[in-house]
Image (cartoon, rainbow, N blue to C red):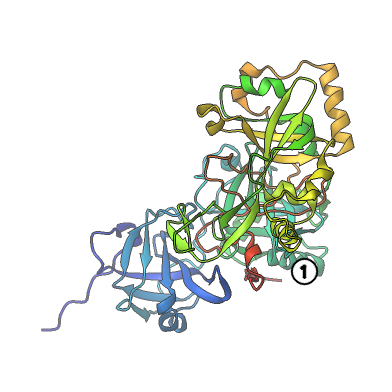
Amino acid sequence: MASQARLLNLIGHIDNSKDTWRIKVRVARLYEVPSWNNPKEICRIEMILLDEKNDKIQASVKDKLIRVYRPLIHEGELYTISNFLVLENNDKLKTCKNKWKINFHRNTSVKDCPPIGIDKFGFEMVSFQNIFDQLPLPNVFIDIIGCLKGKSPVEIVRDEDGKTTKKMTIKLRDENSLILEVLLWGDYVDLLLNYVDSHPEKRVVVIVQFAKLKYFNRIPYVSNSFYATKLLLNKNCEATTSFLERYGDTDDDAYLLEEIAVGRSLSIQEEFLSLTKRVQIADIVAIKEPCFCVVVGTIKRVETQHDWFYSSCKLCATEVTMNDNGTFYCFKCKKTVKFVSTRYKVVFKVEDDSGSASLLMFCREMIQLIQKTAVDLRETLIKNGEDGLFPIEFDDLLEKQFLFKLNISEYNLSKNYKVYTVSRITDDPELLSAHFALLQTQELYNVSDAATATAGTSQTISFINENESVSVIGDNREMNSSDACNITPSKRGIEEVVPGELYILGEEGQSSAIRPRIVVKVEKDV
């Protein structure tokens, strides 16, 4: 008597109780992740698997098995997969909502299967209204759809090694006339522009799948990830058809795109003049809860009792400790690292009419001001036999006035630590003049209300710069990737360590290190 065929399992039933699951799935997304210390070497393959119930699960193939499984698996195809490890998904950012993820091992079976009722895309569209209501989980990738209504000029962003990438903000409109902004990086910029330029009189419906949801002063926006995100332009699919039916024909000028301003844009003005409260330096010590605030002050001196740089893990930018054998240990990554980066960590004494404070600036702000990396300055000092001294370039900042956006952190308050992190800086004369004018016409921020941190915000802003603060000394000392840009006004761009992303911060200590070219999955129909 023939043995009964093994039953198929649904993704929703999978847990870590056994390793003998058997699933029929479509590979909704497949991407290769380069090694952080050798961009030409693939360290793993990531997949997002989809079943007939539209449930998803993340799956990984580690480096030693890539040569076995890469020829067998292709994006969009259907497979029966059995015998795999099931682990809890503890990633900071998740490609899907599933609590579990799959790891292939050498006995994992992958077999082609005939067409069955599994959707090609598995969209789980999140409405703009739900995004503005902050209903989606912020640590899970989302899918959105909207009609392209505006785009900013392309900006060229440099990292600490001088490598450049492109970024651009676009505006999407939904069927309820809500506007959501999307920040595109790298090849995503070129691919969208190429399509728009070749279809100048065509309405463009944009689907961004597996996108990151972020917040700027509590205002949501969406950004692509390095590898996981799919960009679909006027895709011939049910999602596009359904959206256009809801959208209707009332938007007669749908193909006319608004030009979103960059540089001294409304978002920068709002951030320094209205969305973040103003205080005098002497009032900072009265703040009782974590918040952001803006002060204007003059840099008086460098506080040389603090180091001006630190050695960091190249993967997460956290400060490392040196082992007895000369290697380094990263407590955040929980492993020994062979190579480290040199990064800025400079404390300045800043004064206004009310008093003075110690303000800490990391790489992003220092590169804006100095236009040189920490590695550049340290190499010069060593070459001149001055290692151990502070760079003379810091003297050029003395007696100059800036607007500082400060992060008053929980660490500052709980430890009574009076060195405050600068999360943004500008010397824009118009912003400085407007700041002083506001001080003359209205009372300063009531520090007892500092817990509110920001003023009321609208549902859309002209967002050009991403905003997440670095931690103060004593925290993880984690810093995000930098935009080395002109000081007026300030700009920053960030990435987060997420599934499917290579996240290299400051490959300064290794001249051969190259940031990998971003490989983008784009599907478009003319």
Q: Quadrant of the N terminus?
A: bottom left
Q: Is residue 299 above or below residue 60?
A: above
Where residue 151 appears, x then y in whole percent? 78, 54
* Of residues 205 and 156, the one drawn nearer to the viewer in this rendering: 156
Q: Which residue is mark 1?
A: 194
Q: Secondary structure at mark 1?
A: helix
Q: Is residue 169 above or below residue 108?
A: above
Where residue 42 appears, x then y in whole percent? 52, 75
Residue in the image at 45% along x and 52% along y: 331
Q: Quadrant of the C terminus?
A: bottom right
Whether residue 274 is visible here, answered yes or no, is no
Q: Is residue 383 left or right of residue 123?
A: right
Whether residue 19 is visible here, answered yes or no, is yes
Residue in the image at 49% along x and 45% along y: 137
* Of residues 310 and 267, the one drawn nearer to the viewer in this rendering: 310
Furthest residue in direction left, as rendered: 1
Where residue 343 appears, x then y in whole percent? 64, 53
Q: Is residue 499 left or right of residue 176?
A: left
Q: Is residue 332 left or right of residue 361?
A: left
Where residue 509 appears, x then y in whole percent? 63, 65
Name the residue type under label 1.
Answer: Asn
Q: How many marks?
A: 1
Number of residues whose C-alpha sits closer than 10 Å to that of mark 1, classed few (under 14), some (14–19) or many (20 or more): few
